[in-house]
Image (cartoon, rainbow, N blue to C red):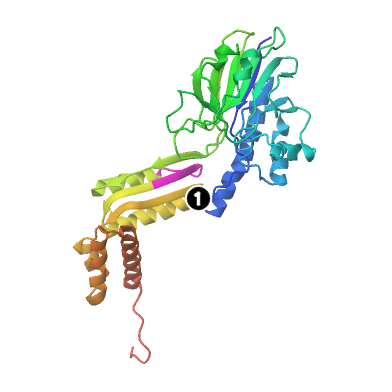
Amino acid sequence: MALRLLHTADWQIGRIYSQFEPDDAAALFEARFFAIERLAALAIEHSVDAVLVAGDVFDAQTVSDKTIRRLFNAMNGYPGAWVMLPGNHDASLAESVWTRAHRLAIVPPNIVTCLEPSVRIVGERFAVLPAPLMQRHTYGDLTEWFSTASTPEGLPRIGLAHGCVQGVLPDEVDSANPIAADRAVTARLDYLALGDWHGSKRIDERTWYAGTPETDRFRANDSGQALLVGIAAPGAMPEVLTLQTGRYRWRQIEPRLAVRSDLDEALEALAATGPDDVLQFRVSGVCDLNGQRRLQQGVEAARARLRALVYESHGLQLEPTDADIASLHADGYVGEVLQQLRTEQAGLHADRARNALVILAHMLDELGSRPAVASPGARA
Protein backbone atom coordinates (compact mmCIF):
# COMPACT_ATOMS: atom_id res chain seq x y z
CA MET A 1 0.00 0.00 0.00
CA ALA A 2 1.29 3.46 -0.91
CA LEU A 3 2.89 5.57 1.79
CA ARG A 4 1.75 9.16 2.29
CA LEU A 5 3.70 11.66 4.39
CA LEU A 6 3.40 15.33 5.30
CA HIS A 7 6.83 16.96 5.41
CA THR A 8 7.33 20.18 7.37
CA ALA A 9 10.16 21.90 9.23
CA ASP A 10 11.40 25.07 10.92
CA TRP A 11 8.37 25.77 13.09
CA GLN A 12 10.50 28.10 15.27
CA ILE A 13 7.93 27.93 18.07
CA GLY A 14 8.56 30.66 20.62
CA ARG A 15 10.16 33.08 18.19
CA ILE A 16 10.15 36.71 19.40
CA TYR A 17 9.55 39.42 16.78
CA SER A 18 11.32 42.31 18.45
CA GLN A 19 11.43 44.48 15.32
CA PHE A 20 7.64 44.98 15.45
CA GLU A 21 5.28 46.81 17.76
CA PRO A 22 4.19 44.66 20.75
CA ASP A 23 0.68 43.87 19.52
CA ASP A 24 1.97 42.88 16.07
CA ALA A 25 4.78 40.80 17.58
CA ALA A 26 2.23 38.96 19.74
CA ALA A 27 0.04 38.16 16.72
CA LEU A 28 3.01 36.79 14.76
CA PHE A 29 4.03 34.72 17.80
CA GLU A 30 0.52 33.21 17.92
CA ALA A 31 0.47 32.58 14.17
CA ARG A 32 3.09 29.86 14.54
CA PHE A 33 0.77 27.84 16.80
CA PHE A 34 -2.08 28.29 14.34
CA ALA A 35 0.20 26.97 11.58
CA ILE A 36 0.68 23.74 13.55
CA GLU A 37 -3.08 23.39 13.91
CA ARG A 38 -3.38 23.79 10.12
CA LEU A 39 -0.75 21.08 9.61
CA ALA A 40 -2.77 18.74 11.83
CA ALA A 41 -5.90 19.49 9.79
CA LEU A 42 -4.04 18.85 6.53
CA ALA A 43 -2.71 15.56 7.87
CA ILE A 44 -6.29 14.46 8.53
CA GLU A 45 -7.59 15.81 5.22
CA HIS A 46 -4.96 13.95 3.18
CA SER A 47 -4.97 10.79 5.30
CA VAL A 48 -1.21 10.76 5.78
CA ASP A 49 0.63 7.97 7.55
CA ALA A 50 2.84 10.40 9.47
CA VAL A 51 4.03 13.99 9.74
CA LEU A 52 7.79 14.48 9.39
CA VAL A 53 9.20 17.54 11.20
CA ALA A 54 12.75 18.18 10.00
CA GLY A 55 14.23 20.22 12.83
CA ASP A 56 13.98 23.61 14.55
CA VAL A 57 10.65 22.78 16.13
CA PHE A 58 11.51 25.35 18.82
CA ASP A 59 13.23 28.67 18.21
CA ALA A 60 15.40 28.38 21.32
CA GLN A 61 16.25 26.04 24.17
CA THR A 62 14.94 28.64 26.60
CA VAL A 63 11.28 28.74 25.54
CA SER A 64 8.90 28.60 28.50
CA ASP A 65 7.21 25.47 29.77
CA LYS A 66 3.92 27.07 28.78
CA THR A 67 5.12 27.40 25.18
CA ILE A 68 6.17 23.74 25.11
CA ARG A 69 2.78 22.66 26.43
CA ARG A 70 0.96 24.86 23.92
CA LEU A 71 2.88 23.29 21.07
CA PHE A 72 1.83 19.76 21.93
CA ASN A 73 -1.73 20.95 22.43
CA ALA A 74 -1.69 22.43 18.91
CA MET A 75 -0.70 19.01 17.55
CA ASN A 76 -3.68 17.22 19.12
CA GLY A 77 -5.77 17.53 15.94
CA TYR A 78 -3.84 14.73 14.24
CA PRO A 79 -3.64 11.49 16.25
CA GLY A 80 -1.23 9.76 13.87
CA ALA A 81 2.54 9.71 14.14
CA TRP A 82 4.57 12.92 14.31
CA VAL A 83 8.27 12.23 13.75
CA MET A 84 10.26 15.14 15.18
CA LEU A 85 13.95 16.01 14.80
CA PRO A 86 16.08 18.48 16.76
CA GLY A 87 17.72 21.18 14.62
CA ASN A 88 20.32 23.84 15.29
CA HIS A 89 17.93 26.03 17.33
CA ASP A 90 16.76 23.13 19.52
CA ALA A 91 19.70 20.73 19.38
CA SER A 92 19.61 17.49 21.35
CA LEU A 93 21.90 18.60 24.16
CA ALA A 94 22.35 16.70 27.43
CA GLU A 95 19.87 19.19 28.85
CA SER A 96 17.58 20.67 26.21
CA VAL A 97 14.06 21.77 25.44
CA TRP A 98 13.43 18.14 24.44
CA THR A 99 14.60 16.65 27.74
CA ARG A 100 12.49 19.26 29.50
CA ALA A 101 9.41 18.27 27.48
CA HIS A 102 9.89 14.60 28.39
CA ARG A 103 10.53 15.48 32.03
CA LEU A 104 7.23 17.40 32.06
CA ALA A 105 5.57 14.19 30.78
CA ILE A 106 3.68 16.11 28.08
CA VAL A 107 4.93 14.28 24.98
CA PRO A 108 2.02 12.11 23.71
CA PRO A 109 2.75 8.50 22.71
CA ASN A 110 2.05 9.23 19.02
CA ILE A 111 4.99 11.65 18.88
CA VAL A 112 8.37 10.15 18.00
CA THR A 113 11.24 12.39 19.14
CA CYS A 114 14.44 11.41 17.33
CA LEU A 115 17.03 12.52 19.86
CA GLU A 116 19.78 10.16 18.70
CA PRO A 117 20.92 8.79 15.33
CA SER A 118 19.29 5.38 15.19
CA VAL A 119 16.76 3.75 12.88
CA ARG A 120 13.14 4.17 13.97
CA ILE A 121 10.30 2.03 12.58
CA VAL A 122 7.08 4.03 12.43
CA GLY A 123 3.79 2.15 12.47
CA GLU A 124 5.35 -0.82 10.66
CA ARG A 125 4.95 1.34 7.55
CA PHE A 126 8.40 2.87 7.01
CA ALA A 127 11.87 3.24 8.49
CA VAL A 128 13.20 6.65 9.51
CA LEU A 129 16.92 7.39 9.47
CA PRO A 130 17.29 10.58 11.56
CA ALA A 131 20.31 12.86 11.86
CA PRO A 132 19.55 14.98 14.95
CA LEU A 133 21.88 17.85 15.70
CA MET A 134 23.59 17.20 19.02
CA GLN A 135 24.97 20.76 19.12
CA ARG A 136 24.06 23.99 17.35
CA HIS A 137 26.82 23.77 14.75
CA THR A 138 28.78 20.82 13.46
CA TYR A 139 31.13 20.59 10.50
CA GLY A 140 30.82 16.90 9.80
CA ASP A 141 28.00 15.34 7.78
CA LEU A 142 25.66 13.74 10.31
CA THR A 143 23.79 11.90 7.53
CA GLU A 144 26.84 9.84 6.56
CA TRP A 145 25.69 6.87 8.64
CA PHE A 146 22.55 6.58 6.50
CA SER A 147 24.59 4.88 3.75
CA THR A 148 25.54 1.88 5.92
CA ALA A 149 22.34 1.63 7.98
CA SER A 150 20.23 -1.49 7.51
CA THR A 151 16.43 -1.36 7.58
CA PRO A 152 13.76 -4.08 7.31
CA GLU A 153 13.19 -5.43 3.84
CA GLY A 154 10.10 -4.04 2.12
CA LEU A 155 9.86 -0.82 4.15
CA PRO A 156 10.52 2.57 2.51
CA ARG A 157 13.70 4.27 3.79
CA ILE A 158 13.05 7.87 4.83
CA GLY A 159 15.91 10.20 5.79
CA LEU A 160 15.29 13.09 8.18
CA ALA A 161 17.94 15.81 8.56
CA HIS A 162 18.53 19.48 9.26
CA GLY A 163 21.35 21.41 7.64
CA CYS A 164 22.91 22.77 4.47
CA VAL A 165 23.08 20.69 1.31
CA GLN A 166 26.58 21.25 -0.04
CA GLY A 167 27.01 23.12 -3.31
CA VAL A 168 23.29 23.74 -3.83
CA LEU A 169 22.06 26.52 -1.57
CA PRO A 170 23.08 30.18 -2.14
CA ASP A 171 26.68 31.06 -1.28
CA GLU A 172 25.70 33.28 1.67
CA VAL A 173 24.02 30.38 3.52
CA ASP A 174 25.98 29.20 6.55
CA SER A 175 28.07 26.14 5.61
CA ALA A 176 27.72 24.58 9.09
CA ASN A 177 25.77 21.31 9.46
CA PRO A 178 26.68 20.04 5.96
CA ILE A 179 24.70 17.40 4.09
CA ALA A 180 26.05 15.65 1.00
CA ALA A 181 24.08 16.55 -2.12
CA ASP A 182 23.90 12.89 -3.21
CA ARG A 183 22.90 11.47 0.18
CA ALA A 184 19.54 10.13 -1.04
CA VAL A 185 21.37 8.11 -3.71
CA THR A 186 24.26 6.81 -1.58
CA ALA A 187 21.93 5.86 1.28
CA ARG A 188 19.28 4.28 -0.98
CA LEU A 189 16.63 6.59 0.45
CA ASP A 190 13.14 6.73 -0.94
CA TYR A 191 12.87 10.28 0.35
CA LEU A 192 15.11 12.70 2.27
CA ALA A 193 13.13 15.25 4.30
CA LEU A 194 15.21 18.33 5.10
CA GLY A 195 14.92 21.41 7.27
CA ASP A 196 16.94 24.61 7.81
CA TRP A 197 16.21 26.44 4.55
CA HIS A 198 13.00 28.34 5.29
CA GLY A 199 11.46 27.96 1.84
CA SER A 200 10.21 24.92 -0.05
CA LYS A 201 13.03 23.76 -2.32
CA ARG A 202 13.65 20.70 -4.48
CA ILE A 203 17.23 19.44 -4.39
CA ASP A 204 16.57 16.36 -6.52
CA GLU A 205 13.69 13.95 -7.12
CA ARG A 206 14.04 12.41 -3.66
CA THR A 207 15.43 15.33 -1.64
CA TRP A 208 13.39 18.35 -0.56
CA TYR A 209 13.36 21.21 1.92
CA ALA A 210 9.84 21.81 3.22
CA GLY A 211 10.38 25.36 4.48
CA THR A 212 8.65 26.96 7.43
CA PRO A 213 4.85 26.63 7.52
CA GLU A 214 4.41 30.29 8.53
CA THR A 215 6.59 32.88 6.79
CA ASP A 216 8.94 34.68 9.16
CA ARG A 217 11.15 36.94 7.04
CA PHE A 218 10.87 39.44 4.21
CA ARG A 219 13.21 37.65 1.83
CA ALA A 220 11.12 35.84 -0.78
CA ASN A 221 11.90 32.13 -0.50
CA ASP A 222 8.68 30.24 -1.23
CA SER A 223 7.76 29.77 2.43
CA GLY A 224 4.44 29.24 4.21
CA GLN A 225 4.03 25.72 2.84
CA ALA A 226 4.32 22.03 3.65
CA LEU A 227 4.99 19.11 1.32
CA LEU A 228 2.64 16.18 0.70
CA VAL A 229 4.80 13.19 -0.27
CA GLY A 230 3.43 10.05 -1.87
CA ILE A 231 5.57 6.91 -2.31
CA ALA A 232 3.84 4.09 -4.21
CA ALA A 233 6.33 1.42 -3.10
CA PRO A 234 9.94 1.12 -1.95
CA GLY A 235 12.18 2.32 -4.77
CA ALA A 236 9.40 4.22 -6.54
CA MET A 237 9.95 7.89 -7.28
CA PRO A 238 8.09 10.06 -4.75
CA GLU A 239 5.34 12.42 -5.84
CA VAL A 240 5.62 15.75 -4.05
CA LEU A 241 2.91 18.41 -3.86
CA THR A 242 3.08 21.76 -2.04
CA LEU A 243 0.26 22.66 0.35
CA GLN A 244 -0.31 26.21 1.51
CA THR A 245 -0.20 26.59 5.27
CA GLY A 246 0.81 30.19 6.04
CA ARG A 247 -1.57 32.96 6.96
CA TYR A 248 0.51 36.11 6.75
CA ARG A 249 2.20 37.38 3.58
CA TRP A 250 5.55 39.03 4.18
CA ARG A 251 6.10 41.61 1.47
CA GLN A 252 8.58 44.29 0.49
CA ILE A 253 7.78 47.53 -1.33
CA GLU A 254 10.88 49.56 -2.12
CA PRO A 255 10.02 52.62 -4.22
CA ARG A 256 12.66 55.07 -5.35
CA LEU A 257 11.19 58.54 -5.72
CA ALA A 258 12.38 60.95 -8.37
CA VAL A 259 9.26 62.51 -9.88
CA ARG A 260 5.71 63.05 -8.60
CA SER A 261 4.34 59.98 -10.37
CA ASP A 262 6.78 57.78 -8.42
CA LEU A 263 5.15 58.88 -5.17
CA ASP A 264 1.66 58.30 -6.61
CA GLU A 265 2.63 54.76 -7.60
CA ALA A 266 4.21 54.07 -4.19
CA LEU A 267 1.09 55.22 -2.37
CA GLU A 268 -1.12 53.12 -4.66
CA ALA A 269 1.00 50.03 -3.90
CA LEU A 270 0.80 50.81 -0.19
CA ALA A 271 -2.98 51.25 -0.35
CA ALA A 272 -3.33 47.84 -2.04
CA THR A 273 -2.07 46.00 1.05
CA GLY A 274 -4.40 44.30 3.50
CA PRO A 275 -4.80 42.96 7.04
CA ASP A 276 -2.87 39.73 6.36
CA ASP A 277 0.21 41.55 5.09
CA VAL A 278 3.44 42.02 7.00
CA LEU A 279 5.15 44.79 5.08
CA GLN A 280 8.58 46.30 4.84
CA PHE A 281 8.11 49.69 3.16
CA ARG A 282 11.53 51.11 2.32
CA VAL A 283 11.55 54.47 0.54
CA SER A 284 14.54 56.15 -1.07
CA GLY A 285 15.16 58.99 -3.49
CA VAL A 286 14.00 62.60 -3.26
CA CYS A 287 10.73 64.32 -2.44
CA ASP A 288 9.48 67.71 -1.30
CA LEU A 289 7.72 68.44 1.98
CA ASN A 290 4.27 68.10 0.49
CA GLY A 291 5.24 64.67 -0.83
CA GLN A 292 6.59 63.75 2.58
CA ARG A 293 3.28 64.72 4.18
CA ARG A 294 1.38 62.52 1.74
CA LEU A 295 3.82 59.69 2.34
CA GLN A 296 3.44 59.91 6.10
CA GLN A 297 -0.34 59.95 5.86
CA GLY A 298 -0.25 56.84 3.68
CA VAL A 299 2.09 55.07 6.08
CA GLU A 300 -0.05 55.85 9.13
CA ALA A 301 -3.19 54.63 7.34
CA ALA A 302 -1.38 51.42 6.37
CA ARG A 303 -0.03 50.92 9.87
CA ALA A 304 -3.59 50.74 11.19
CA ARG A 305 -4.70 48.42 8.38
CA LEU A 306 -1.82 45.92 8.10
CA ARG A 307 -0.87 43.10 10.42
CA ALA A 308 2.58 44.70 10.81
CA LEU A 309 4.60 47.42 9.12
CA VAL A 310 8.29 48.28 9.12
CA TYR A 311 8.78 51.72 7.58
CA GLU A 312 12.28 52.78 6.55
CA SER A 313 13.06 56.17 5.02
CA HIS A 314 16.80 56.42 5.65
CA GLY A 315 17.43 56.70 1.93
CA LEU A 316 14.91 59.49 1.37
CA GLN A 317 16.21 63.03 1.01
CA LEU A 318 13.84 65.92 1.52
CA GLU A 319 14.23 68.84 -0.84
CA PRO A 320 11.68 71.48 0.11
CA THR A 321 10.60 73.67 -2.77
CA ASP A 322 10.31 77.42 -2.48
CA ALA A 323 6.55 76.86 -2.33
CA ASP A 324 7.06 74.48 0.62
CA ILE A 325 9.08 77.05 2.53
CA ALA A 326 6.61 79.82 1.71
CA SER A 327 3.68 77.69 2.88
CA LEU A 328 5.34 77.28 6.27
CA HIS A 329 5.57 81.05 6.77
CA ALA A 330 9.05 80.55 8.22
CA ASP A 331 10.66 83.96 8.48
CA GLY A 332 13.79 85.20 10.18
CA TYR A 333 15.73 82.72 12.27
CA VAL A 334 13.35 79.80 11.63
CA GLY A 335 13.72 80.28 7.91
CA GLU A 336 17.50 80.24 8.27
CA VAL A 337 17.30 76.97 10.24
CA LEU A 338 15.19 75.39 7.50
CA GLN A 339 17.71 76.38 4.86
CA GLN A 340 20.57 75.03 6.97
CA LEU A 341 18.83 71.69 7.46
CA ARG A 342 18.24 71.47 3.70
CA THR A 343 21.97 71.84 3.16
CA GLU A 344 23.03 69.44 5.91
CA GLN A 345 21.11 66.54 4.34
CA ALA A 346 24.06 66.08 2.03
CA GLY A 347 26.57 65.90 4.91
CA LEU A 348 27.70 63.41 7.52
CA HIS A 349 24.57 63.81 9.62
CA ALA A 350 22.06 63.44 6.79
CA ASP A 351 19.62 61.28 8.78
CA ARG A 352 19.61 63.70 11.70
CA ALA A 353 19.13 66.71 9.42
CA ARG A 354 16.28 65.03 7.54
CA ASN A 355 14.51 64.04 10.74
CA ALA A 356 14.91 67.53 12.18
CA LEU A 357 13.57 69.03 8.96
CA VAL A 358 10.50 66.78 9.09
CA ILE A 359 9.85 67.61 12.76
CA LEU A 360 10.27 71.35 12.23
CA ALA A 361 8.06 71.34 9.15
CA HIS A 362 5.41 69.35 11.02
CA MET A 363 5.47 71.80 13.94
CA LEU A 364 5.16 74.77 11.60
CA ASP A 365 2.31 73.02 9.77
CA GLU A 366 0.45 72.54 13.05
CA LEU A 367 1.01 76.13 14.10
CA GLY A 368 -0.20 77.37 10.74
CA SER A 369 -3.35 75.23 10.88
CA ARG A 370 -4.44 76.35 14.35
CA PRO A 371 -7.13 79.01 14.59
CA ALA A 372 -5.96 82.33 15.90
CA VAL A 373 -6.58 82.83 19.62
CA ALA A 374 -7.32 86.29 20.92
CA SER A 375 -4.84 87.45 23.50
CA PRO A 376 -6.13 88.26 27.01
CA GLY A 377 -7.68 91.71 27.18
CA ALA A 378 -8.09 92.04 23.39
CA ARG A 379 -11.31 93.63 22.24
CA ALA A 380 -13.82 91.64 20.23
Describe the element under mark 1 as helix, strand or loop.
loop
The residue stretch that appears in magenta: 272-281
In this view, the residue in front, 162 or 110, is 162
On the question of residue 283 being in view, the answer is yes
Residue denoted by label 1: 19
Residue at horizontal 34 percent and vertical 73 percent from the top? 367
**Image mark count:** 1
Q: Position of residue 144 (x, y in %)?
A: 60, 19
Q: Position of residue 172 (x, y in %)?
A: 43, 33
Q: Amino acid at mark 1?
A: Gln
Outermost residue toward the left? 322
Q: Is residue 153 left or right of residue 135?
A: right
Whether 232 is among the magenta residues is no
Q: Quadrant of the N terminus?
A: top right
On the question of residue 45 being in view, the answer is no
Q: Is residue 160 above or below residue 346?
A: above
Whether 279 is among the magenta residues is yes
Q: Position of residue 245 (x, y in %)?
A: 57, 31
